[in-house]
Image: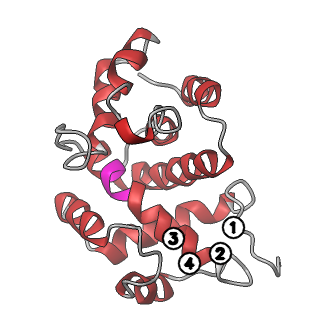
Amino acid sequence: MLTLQKAQELNDAQVTEHHLILHARNVMYAMGAMADAFGEDREHWMAIGYLHDFDYEKFPDEHLQHTENELLALGVDAADVRAILSHGYGICSDVKPETNLEKSLFTVDELTGIIQACARMRPHGISDLEVKSFMKKFKDKKFAAKCDRDLIRRGCEMLGMEVAQVAEICIEGMKPFAAQIELLGTEQT
């Protein structure tokens, strides 16, 4: 099973672009919160979240096409590699999310982009972001327009949850790590 330390070692050796590292952290903390919600292994889910875009910087136009062989060769368990591949389902992978871990990663990957965009607009960053404010921005298709809302909805349906439920879990899970994900805001309390 992938540990958080191993995921960080692998990802940090491959990913150098600041925005991709921030994204990995956002997904990692959101996945930790999702693990808690499902009563699963928090560190393991965080490790999968941190490593999910392992090949993106090197192969942005061939995302996930180089992940499986490389990670298996580096000693990552096949089930963990499968979970990582599943986050690109229907986009750049045909691996359908089946477990709560896989469904969560599929959903959270896009969802954290909107959460991050919402928090960046607020004077206090993510610290006082509530799901009600998030949902207003989620419904505004022009806001964080590159984030695929239909994909998020599909992921939530797979999980048997509403968007607001998943968003609240992720927002609350990300709040304690506001400094690490650079979402403290301009007027830190």
Q: Between disc 1 and disc 4, whose residue precedes?
A: 4
Residue type of the residue flagged with mark 1: Leu
Q: Between disc 1 and disc 3, whose residue precedes?
A: 3
> Are there few (<14), some (14-19), or many (20+) residues within 10 Å of tag 1?
many
The residue shown at (21%, 44%) is 97
Q: Which residue is mark 4?
A: 118
Q: Which residue is mark 3?
A: 115
Mark 3 and mark 2: span between their CA atoms? 9 Å
- Mark 4 in CB contact with mark 3 (< 8 angstroms): yes
Residue span colored magenta? 104-108
Residue type of the residue flagged with mark 4: Cys
> Are there few (<14), some (14-19), or many (20+) residues within 10 Å of tag 2?
some
- Mark 1 in CB contact with mark 2 (< 8 angstroms): yes
Residue type of the residue flagged with mark 3: Ile
Mark 4 and mark 3: span between their CA atoms? 5 Å
**Foreground pick, 164 / 73:** 73
Q: Is residue 174 left or right of residue 75?
A: right
Residue 183's mark?
1
Q: Is the magenta region chiefly helix, strand or loop?
A: helix
